[in-house]
Amino acid sequence: MRKLAVLVTLMFCMTSLITSAVANAGVVTRIKDVAKVQGVRSNQLVGYGLVIGLNGTGDSSKNIETVQSLSSMLKSFGVIVSAAQLQAKNVAAVMVTAELPPFTKSGDTIDITVSSMGDAKDLQGGVLLQTPLKAANGQVYAVGQGPVVTGGFSVASAGNSQSKNHPTVGRMTNGAIVERDVDTKLAVNGAITLSLSQPDFTTANRMSEAIDERFGGISNARDPGTVVVNVPSQYDGNLVGFVAALEEIRINPDNIAKIVINERTGTIVMGQNVSIDEVAVAQGGLSIRITKNNDVSQPSQFATVGSTVTNSNTTVDVKEDKANIITLPATARVGDVVNALNTIGATPRDIISILQAMKAAGAVHADLQII
């Protein structure tokens, strides 16, 4: 009776462990973390401008574009000065870049980056003049202006110079004002399209099933990277609430087995789905040492002939360390692979070579990606 009780207890513990392992086999996450609504995206802006007020660290007279831009700017204010009469050492020509977030409205402010395009030494202390920022369609969506902060410096004196960070690139927090609204449509023809960050057939199908389980048959996995969701009638006029409800649905995303290797740093990252066939791995070292000694040979004391000569004796010593051989069982997981390779004392670079050889032998069932 006592043995039976112990056996029942062991079976219960094993069942609990198996259940826990199955529950932890996949990571459950929100749709919000693996997909986004198609059309909700940022837009890049770019503009050309001038930074003035520099303490002699601006562009030299060799930069014709800076002098011409300065002359054109003064002309717009009624000051007629030829380019040949201007010295631009306190002015720098710059390119201004920014990212326009989705749903930005007119009057909002965005951050901008100011980068010198000439031979200016430092933009610290300068002021960016009003600069229109255009999108790829050529339309102006924002205007930037204000003091430039570089977060660095560059000092030179008597042939010596010191610099910190990049003084020719500055960041302006809330440095541009949005002048045009961004037209973003959440739904097209009564449907919302979700785009997966990592296209996958299984993940797209699971996402569609989870949505249908919550709202009924309203979704369709069109392809591995797209799931189309029809807006239910109860959410007419409340697209934001519907999208928020979609984003909170939890799914178990799937990914292909992949091993990412960075040979420069010796970093190896393996996913949980990596498996291998039964394979034997040997890891050992071969050491060869060659030494050379010079011996002097002289004739005997009473010899009538002969002379002193020098002989070279070369010794070759070959030492082969005992190879460490370990067998990895079939369907081993990533933890088994790492533990087994660590057992034989393999370094990260050894593991890289071993994994490449195992992949070439067809024993590793994973995508081997080298970066």
Image (cartoon, helix red, strand yellow):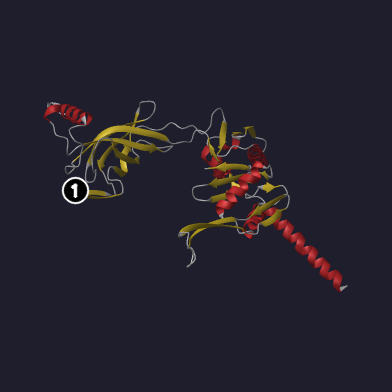
**Which residue occupies 64% across, 33% down?**
220
| Residue that lies at the very extreme toward the bottom in this rendered image | 2
| Residue that lies at the very extreme toward the front in this rendered image | 304
Of the residues shown, which amino acid type is indicated by label 1? Gly
Camera-nearest residue between 108 and 129: 129
Left or right: 270 in relation to 68: right
Q: Quadrant of the N terminus?
A: bottom right
Camera-nearest residue between 301 and 135: 301
Q: Is residue 51 above or below residue 156?
A: above
> Is any part of residue 188 visible from this angle?
yes
Q: Residue 351: x and y, percent? A: 59, 51
Left or right: 207 in relation to 77: right
**Which residue occupies 72% across, 60% down?**
17
| Residue that lies at the very extreme toward the right in this rendered image | 1
Camera-nearest residue between 320 and 119: 320
> Is any part of residue 24 visible from this angle?
no
Query: In the picture, residue 66 is in which quadrant?
Result: top left
Q: Residue 178: x and y, percent? A: 34, 36
Mark 1 lies on residue: 159
Left or right: 244 in relation to 217: left
Dot 1 falls on a residue whose secondary structure is loop
**Which residue occupies 66% across, 41% down?**
206
Camera-nearest residue between 237 and 301: 301
Q: Is residue 296 above or below residue 144?
A: below
Query: In the picture, residue 249 is in which quadrant?
Result: top right
Q: Residue 19: x and y, percent? A: 73, 56
Q: Residue 2: x and y, percent? A: 85, 73
Classify mark 1: residues with Cα within 10 Å, few (<14), some (14-19) or many (20+). Answer: few
